[in-house]
Amino acid sequence: DGGRQRFNRGWRVEFSSVLGPYKGGLRFHPTVNDGVLKFLGFEQIFKNALTGLPLGGGKGGSDFDPKGKSEGEVRRFCESFMTELFRYLHPSTDVPAGDIGVGGREIGYMYGQYKRLTNKHGEGVLTGKSMLFGGSPFRPEATGYGLIYITKIAVEKRLGRTLEGSCCAVSGSGNVAQFAAKKLMEFGAKVMTFSDSNGVLVFDDGMTEDDWDSIVEAKNVHRMRLRDIEDKVTGRYIPNESPWTLTDDTTPFHLAFPCATQNEIDGKGAELLLSKGVLGVFEGANLPTTIKGQEVLRSRPDVIYIPGKAANAGGVGVSGLEMAQNAQRLQWEPEEVDDKLQKMMGEIYEQMEAASGEGGTLEEGANRAGFLKVTRAMEELGWFY
């Protein structure tokens, strides 16, 4: 806005088209680089395979930071980014979606630039679009809702209990965390924490619906930090902490939902969760648990651990359903999309159980099921022999 030019780097990693067009989100965040996008894109291959939809794997983004930028600055960056990206997109080639820093606003700006550049309208080259121009019902809710649908199945089958009354630690305060918290409360669970990069809100008696409304308005409308709304919610704000570093806090955690970003639960964080009596960890973010954290969780096979490639696959699953609606030039009813999402998460759980073998974990099952589907497809295509 001040007339000074700024330069950012952007990438699109097209990783695997074995099962279908490249599919994966765009992330705008200062930590983005080609290495981060490569490891996220590799994970995306197997996540997409588990959905049962014909989707390949990819990832993209930029080190541009939308925080603190004006609407005009965000719009101009999105238009510049799409000016370079549009030539690689096609419903049968590469269909990006949103991710951290890329929500409905950013997708709208990028899609507008795509339409200007190509004179093609109604093409399903981006998902997560507004309902006004080809978006799908339940796309914003899909990742968070899907996460809780598969959690409900796992808790009932593996622990023989329901979600009602469970104390749940949720990290993050973006799209995934918001709708995961909403669905947890619908099922009678208590949401004990919510966080952003500056600190964490702790709800000693569980988040209320009014708390949820205040957080969503602050984050989605006013783009505020959680510290700025402490006086508007029932939680207490602790700066410079996350749910996985609250060593001096006695808040109980039965279930953990890392929904913020990659590598947020390290070895110490995983040990803290075990010391608090956690019964399950369900990844809403992509690869939020470090290698050391995974080792700690694996040391306790009685604790359920469902990795992001399965737990948060509902988002890309409904993106695939949005692509189907775009191809048909139709928009389905919200109930139909929600029914398909619940069925999809149930089928992912069944794949994990079947592939885990006798005595295996759900994590092992998720990794095996996704990998085997991709390798079998490569073999049948003649891509290796």
Image (tube, rainbow, N blue to C red):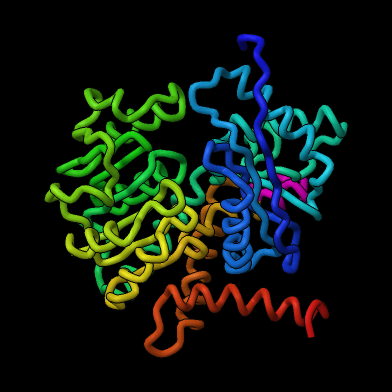
Q: Residue 209's x, y, as percent?
A: 29, 36
Residue located farthest toward the top when viewing the structure as drawn = 2
Q: Quadrant of residue 83?
A: top right
Tell me which residue sits at (34%, 58%) in the image: 266
Location of residue 100 in the rendering, given as x and y in whole percent from the top left corner: 52, 41
Say whether residue 45 is visible: yes
Left or right of 207 on screen, residue 328: right
Number of numbered discs overlaid on the protein picture:
0
Residue extent of the magenta highlight:
322-332
Which residue is depicted at the point 22% across and 23% down? 231
Q: Is residue 188 visible?
A: no
**Residue drawn where x is 33% and y is 34% of the image:** 198
Q: Is residue 269 magenta?
A: no
Q: Is residue 270 above or below residue 96?
A: below
Give above or below for 315 relative to 360.
above
Q: Is residue 6 above or below residue 48?
A: above
Dominant secondary structure of the magenta stretch? Answer: helix
Give the percent coordinates (x, y) of residue 146.
47, 56
Left of 97 or right of it: where is 150?
Answer: left
Furthest toward the right, the residue is 119
Q: Quadrant of the C terminus?
A: bottom right
Residue 370 lies, in percent from the top left, at 58, 73
Give the residue drawn at x 81%, y 48%. Answer: 90
Q: Is residue 332 left or right of residue 68?
A: right
Nearest the eye: 340 or 366: 366
Q: Nearer the viewer, residue 168 or 31?
A: 31
